[in-house]
Image (spheres, helix red, strand yellow):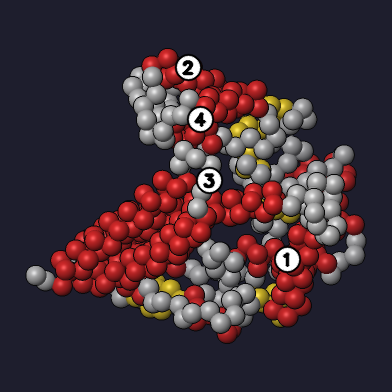
Amino acid sequence: MDGLKRARIKRGAQRAQATKIWNEAELLINGETNEVNIEKLRVILATYDAKIELLRKLDETVSDLIEDEKGLETEIVEADDYLTELTKKRYTIEFFINQSTIHSNSLASPMATTTPQNGHGFPTQNEITTHEDKFVKEYQDSLIRLVNGRYCAKLPWKPNHDPLPTNEAVARGRTRSSVRRLAKDPKTVQTYSELINEQLKRDEGDRDATRFFWLSDPTNPESSFDVYRFKSILFGASCSPFILNATIKKHLDSYNDPIAQRMKADIYVDNLASGTDNEDEAAIYFKHTRSVMSSANFNLREWNSNSSKICALANEENAQDDNTEAKLLGLRWNSKVDTLKLQEKRPVTDPNENVVSITKRDVLRASSKIYDPLGLITPITIRAKIFLQKLWELKYAWDEPLPKPLIEKWVKLSRDLEAATQTEVQRTVA
């Protein structure tokens, strides 16, 4: 038996064990009784984590043994998809443990506490965020600095962390796969090859932690790889949104004027959403915010407005968004007609198809895909929640097919949900 076949057999056995562990956790989570052994779930979670880590190593072993490039590409995609599913299930277990722990603690002594309360027996928001605020302040003061007009930030490393495992083989395979897809569009390859000098720098000492491969000859997709180091913050890292927000907040805190302070409330991740009472105020806001951010070499661009005057200003400074429809905090905003619409997502249950089988899992998946932060279609979505609640009362299992009368009722409700998600509402009304 060759090494590749042996490695795949070992991995298959470990995957089977991971499935068995998840099934055990799912039985506890979806049990008929309300009493859940949280300690047992914690043990399962620890075992599941160890199994995921072992499977990562086995994936790397398998990748190292594959010589055929096409086979390697297929292997990487399949292994990555499998680990993604495992990770989702892992978070499900962790979420259930955390929620159950919070619920248990709040029931243990709902009012018997010496902690200052907000009238409900729970710590106030200020108390909850005290630790986080302290950490942010320490990070801003010690790990973010302004160098030659641009901010330089360190990665927030965990103290005494274990050495990071190598993923060189996986990175090589993924890069080669990406290059082959990009090769169909030479212009895109050229764009990727022009490494842009981003405005937010990363500290020199952290650069070895985020190395990557790229072509030694961008004009030849089959050329060998060179190793590069990211000079800027890697916006795919889990800590990147925190670093970006901490840096922007530090920058805005250096200004005492009202508009800069207002920007702190208007910024969400890397977008700014705001409004004024008239076009003159909007023009002042546009110019001042651009000036504040450009002082640290940030380019506040892709402006969109329902005002032709502001659009003209943005166009003059090459900062206008060419699209009239923009994503705004989970909604789609059409600036030309000034309307709001929900994000377009195809429902799991297509109301136009002949539905033969529906389960409680299908109902939950379909109804949870609708994101309506303003409650624009609450009269419709509440019906979906009531329907799901009814399925719980009738004690249907997650994957048990529903009877025809319930399927017909859900299909009709799906049609209403589909129509509601396509409804446009005037922003001034919303």
Specify which label sits upstream in the sequence, 2 or 3: 3
Amino acid beneath label 4: Trp
Classify residue 233 by image quadrant: bottom right
For the residue carrying disc 2, how many other residues have a C-alpha within 10 Å: few (<14), some (14-19), or many (20+)?
A: few
As measured in the structure, the alpha-carbon distance from the residue carrying label 2 to the one carrying label 3 is 33 Å
As measured in the structure, the alpha-carbon distance from the residue carrying label 1 to the one carrying label 3 is 33 Å
**Residue that mark 1 sits on:** 132
State the residue in front, 390 or 132. 390
Name, please, the residue furthest toward the bottom: 205
Asked whether residue 238 appears in the rendered view, the answer is yes
Specify which label sits upstream in the sequence, 2 or 1: 1
Mark linked to residue 35: 3
Q: Name the front one of labels 4 and 3.
A: 3
Q: Is residue 238 above or below residue 319?
A: below
Classify residue 279 by image quadrant: top right
As measured in the structure, the alpha-carbon distance from the residue carrying label 2 to the one carrying label 4 is 16 Å
Q: Please indicate whether residue 4 sits to the left or right of residue 386 in the image.
A: left
Q: Mark 1 near mark 3, Cβ–Cβ under 8 Å? A: no
Q: Position of residue 56 (x, y in %)?
A: 35, 67
As measured in the structure, the alpha-carbon distance from the residue carrying label 4 to the one carrying label 3 is 17 Å
Amino acid beneath label 2: Lys
Disc 2 secondary structure class: helix
Q: Name the front one of labels 4 and 1.
A: 4
Amino acid beneath label 3: Glu
Residue at (75, 67) in percent of width and height: 131
Q: Position of residue 198 (x, y in %)?
A: 60, 69
Residue at (77, 38) in percent of width and height: 307
Mark linked to residue 333: none
**Residue that mark 4 sits on:** 392
As measured in the structure, the alpha-carbon distance from the residue carrying label 2 to the one carrying label 1 is 47 Å
Mark linked to residue 409: 2
Asked whether residue 202 appears in the rendered view, the answer is no
